[in-house]
Image (spheres, rainbow, N blue to C red):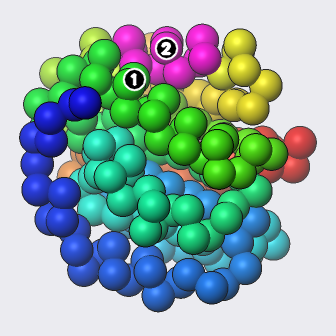
Amino acid sequence: MIEHRIDMYRYFDELENIKTKQGRSCDVLFYGSSTFGIWKTLEDEFAAYKAINAGFGGSTSDEALFHYENIAKPFAPKKVVWYYGDNEPVCGYTVEESKELFTATWNRFFTDFPNVKIITVATKTSPARDCYKDFVAELNAWQKKIADSDDRISYIETADICKKGGRYILENYLPDELHFGRKGYDILFKRIKEELDK
C-alpha cells in the first residue's frame, strides 16, 4: 500500500460539491485533477453525452483512488475520461507509484462496471512545471502502452497541444503557464469527443 503524501481531505469543499451532482444521469464521468476541475464549461460542452465533471483541486491519483467509493462509484458511468499525473511528482509520488495508483483506480471501475470504457488523457507538460517533463514522458509512454494492449482503455495524446518544435505553445495555456486555456481546451474537446463517438 502506498503511503499518503498529502491530506486526503484537503479538497473537502470541492468533493462535497461533486456529491451534490450524484443522482443525475451520467453516461460519461470526467474524473481528474484541476485540468478538469477548472474546465467550467465542460458539462455544457459535453451535455449530449450526459457528462459529469468530477475534477477537483490539484488532486492526485492517490486521492482519486481514496475517494473512489464515495465520489466516483455512485455515478455508475458507462465511460470514464481520466486525467492525472500533473500533481503526483509535486506531491512526492514516483512514476512507479503513479502507475500503481492509476491501475488500482481503473481496476475499481472495471470491477464495479464490467462494460465501462476508460479514456485516459495524456498528462500534459507545461512551462510552469517543465522540470517534471521526464516524469510525464515516462508516465505517458506507460499509459499509451497499456491502452494499446487493452481494448477497454483508449489514450488521447496531448504532447502536440503543449509543444511544437520543442517549444511550448503559450497560446494554448492560461497566464499561469500550467493549465490549458481556451485554445488548449478547444483542441482537447475535439479529441475527447472523437473518442466518445467511437
Q: Which image quarter holds the C terminus?
A: top right
Q: Is residue 116 magenta?
A: no
7 vs 170, nearest the viewer: 7
Disc with the residue nearer the chain's start (1 vs 2)? 1
Q: In the image, residue 107 lies at what x, y percent?
A: 56, 36
Element under label 1? helix
Q: Secondary structure at mark 2?
A: helix
Q: Which residue is mark 1?
A: 99
Magenta-highlighted residues: 137-146
Residue 64, percent from left and from top: 38, 51
Q: Where on the picture, by quarter, is residue 1?
A: top left
Residue 189 against residue 101 in the figure, above or below: below
Q: Name the amino acid, label 1.
A: Lys
Q: Which residue is at a point 47% across and 87% down the rendered structure image?
A: 20
Q: Is residue 42 visible?
A: no
CB-based contact (under 8 Å), mark 1 and mark 2? yes
Question: Residue 17: which disc?
Answer: none
Q: Which residue is mark 2?
A: 142
* Quarter of the rendering containing residue 43: bottom right
> Which residue is at the front of the view, 56 or 45?
56
